[in-house]
Structures are given as structure tokens and as C-alpha cells.
């Protein structure tokens, strides 16, 4: 053997990594990359409020303005009844889950396009990216919850024991946002037009959801409304935060859970189907 051959490094077999290569271990890989998920989430949280004059106050400004507008339109002009609940609290109990859903959906739907430098260079389960995008929405949600607590003190209307179910409805809102977000983020990679469609859908959705009024005021439309998964979430939040003053509509809850499960399952299926080509399309 020649001296040059002895000094040459050994040749290792080529290893090709591609999305979805280990189908049987995909979910284990998602768990394995949990530290990356946390890093991406923390990065997004810092970037959101970095170099802003008002900082975290931006998370409170939009729901505060929406609260005033909806209270005036539905409470003063339309004269929608609210029972024994102050109308601003009724609206705020609907805004709280809607803001969580809207922010989570918006972040998840643009998450892959916003991380093209990672998608095109490094392999990891791409599902980590939209999952990490939900973290910013949770931070904003906690801030808006503080605003709701202030209103409760102002009107002396504290939640009762129903509030223990609030984490379940929070999870339901996140799952609905994730299911829709997986569809939209995969479609955005292929068709960049969806970057402009998503804000329009959210603007439309706030009026197709009972944010500014109670579904008790439209009993003949309740079943049809229930196929919007956020209706069950908003009704559930109001039941948790306002207690017996806003009774829970169980048929709507079951329909909402079913629609959310279908949306999530189909979103995961479509996302996984498109995942192999993300690096090429990005």
C-alpha cells in the first residue's frame, strides 16, 4: 500500500436524510427534537417584541380596541341581551379564546415559509416548526387573560368552580388552530397566495364566531354554528368564566370536538403527505 493511501481518511458509506424517511419512528423523532421546538418558540417570542416601543402592550392593544368596538356595536346598537353578565365581560370571554386561536393559526400557517433557511438545509421532522409557532399565541393569551382578570375585579364578577375546565377548552382551541394551521402552512409552501388569504379568513372568522354576542341569542342557528369549531370553544370559555349565567350547549360541544378532531387528523395527514417536498418547494 502506498504512503498516500495509508494517510487517506477512510471512506464512510453515504447517509441520505430526507423528511419522513423513518415512517415508523416519526413521532419519536418529533419528541427527540423537542429542544429545537423550545429554541424556535423562544426565538419567536423574543423577535415578536424586540425593538418595539410599546413591547408586550401590543398584545393587549388589539383585544382592548376590539372589546370597545364589539361592546358598542352589539351591546349598545344591536341591544343584544347578556343576562346578568356585564356586556364587556361577555365579549372579553369570547375574545380571549378567539385571540388565542387567531394568533396560533396565523403563526402556524406562515411558520414554514418563515424558516426557509432551516427547511432547505437541515433535516428534522417539519412538524416541529408549526408546533413551536403556537408558543407565541400562548404568551399573548396569558397577557389577555390578565386584562380579563382586571375587568373581573372592576365589575366584581369572579369566576366560580367552572374555571377548572378552562385548560381543556384552551387545548381544544390550540388543536383547532394546529389542524387548520397544518393545512394552511403546507398550502402556503406550495402556493404563496395563502399568505394573503389567511388574514382575510381570520377577519371573516371573527364575525362567523359568536365573539360579540352569545349563541343563546340565536337558538335556531345553534346547530349550524356548531360546525365552526371555535363556537364550542367560545361557549366553553364563557361557561368556565361566567358560570351558570351562560349555560353550556352540549350538542354544540360534541359537534365542535368532532370537527376539531377531523380537522387535526386531516391536517396531519396532508402535512405529512406534502412534507417530503418542502425542501424543494421552499
Image (cartoon, grey):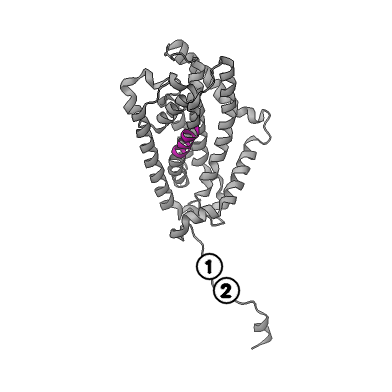
Q: Are marks 1 and 2 in contact (CB under 8 Å)?
A: yes
Viewer-side residue, 116 vs 134:
134
Viewer-side residue, 211 vs 203:
211
Q: Which quadrant does the N terminus fall into?
A: bottom right
Q: Position of residue 266 (x, y in %)?
A: 38, 45
Q: Is residue 117 above or below residue 255?
A: below
Q: Does dot 2 land on a helix, a strand or a loop?
A: loop
Q: Does dot 1 land on a helix, a strand or a loop?
A: loop
- Queried whether the magenta region covers residue 170, the answer comes back as yes
Q: Is residue 75 above or below residue 261?
A: above
Q: Residue at x 59, y 16 (%)?
A: 154
**Left or right position of 162 against 7:** left
Tell me which corner region of the image, top left, top right, bottom left or bottom right, holds residue 209: top left
**Left or right position of 141 against 204:** right
Q: Residue at x 44, y 32 (%)?
A: 201
Distance from the alpha carbon under mark 1 to that under mark 2 = 9 Å
User: Badge 2 is on which residue?
Assistant: 12
Q: Position of residue 257 (x, y in %)?
A: 38, 36
- Queried whether the magenta region covers residue 175, the answer comes back as yes
User: Badge 1 is on which residue?
Assistant: 15
Q: Position of residue 14 (x, y in %)?
A: 53, 70
The magenta region covers 166-177
The tag on residue 145 is none
Amino acid at each position: 500500500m502506498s504512503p498516500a493511501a495509508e494517510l487517506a481518511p477512510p471512506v464512510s458509506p453515504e447517509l441520505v436524510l430526507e423528511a419522513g424517511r423513518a415512517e415508523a419512528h416519526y413521532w419519536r423523532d418529533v419528541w427527540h427534537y423537542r429542544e429545537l421546538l423550545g429554541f424556535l418558540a423562544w426565538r419567536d417570542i423574543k423577535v415578536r417584541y424586540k425593538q418595539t416601543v410599546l413591547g408586550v402592550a401590543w398584545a393587549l392593544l388589539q383585544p382592548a380596541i376590539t372589546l370597545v368596538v364589539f361592546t358598542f356595536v352589539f351591546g349598545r346598537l344591536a341591544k343584544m341581551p347578556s343576562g346578568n353578565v356585564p356586556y364587556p365581560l361577555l365579549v372579553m370571554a369570547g375574545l380571549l379564546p378567539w385571540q388565542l386561536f387567531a394568533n396560533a393559526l396565523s403563526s402556524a400557517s406562515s411558520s414554514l415559509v418563515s424558516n426557509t433557511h432551516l427547511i432547505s438545509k437541515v433535516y428534522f421532522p417539519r412538524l416541529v416548526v408549526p408546533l413551536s409557532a403556537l408558543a407565541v399565541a400562548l404568551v399573548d393569551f396569558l397577557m389577555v387573560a390578565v386584562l380579563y382578570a382586571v375587568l373581573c375585579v372592576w365589575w366584581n364578577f369572579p369566576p366560580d368552580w367552572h374555571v377548572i375546565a378552562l385548560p381543556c377548552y384552551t387545548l381544544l382551541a390550540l388543536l383547532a388552530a394546529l389542524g387548520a394551521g397544518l393545512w394552511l402552512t403546507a398550502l402556503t409552501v406550495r402556493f404563496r397566495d395563502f399568505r394573503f388569504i389567511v388574514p382575510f379568513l381570520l377577519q371573516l372568522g371573527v364575525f362567523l364566531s359568536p365573539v360579540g354576542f352569545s349563541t343563546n341569542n340565536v337558538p335556531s342557528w345553534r346547530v349550524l354554528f356548531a360546525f365552526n369549531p371555535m363556537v364550542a370553544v367560545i361557549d366553553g370559555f364563557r361557561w368556565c368564566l361566567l358560570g351558570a349565567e351562560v349555560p353550556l350547549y352540549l350538542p354544540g360541544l360534541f359537534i365542535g370536538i368532532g370537527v376539531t378532531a377531523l380537522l387535526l387528523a386531516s391536517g396531519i395527514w396532508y402535512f405529512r403527505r406534502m412534507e417530503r417536498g418542502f425542501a424543494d418547494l421552499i
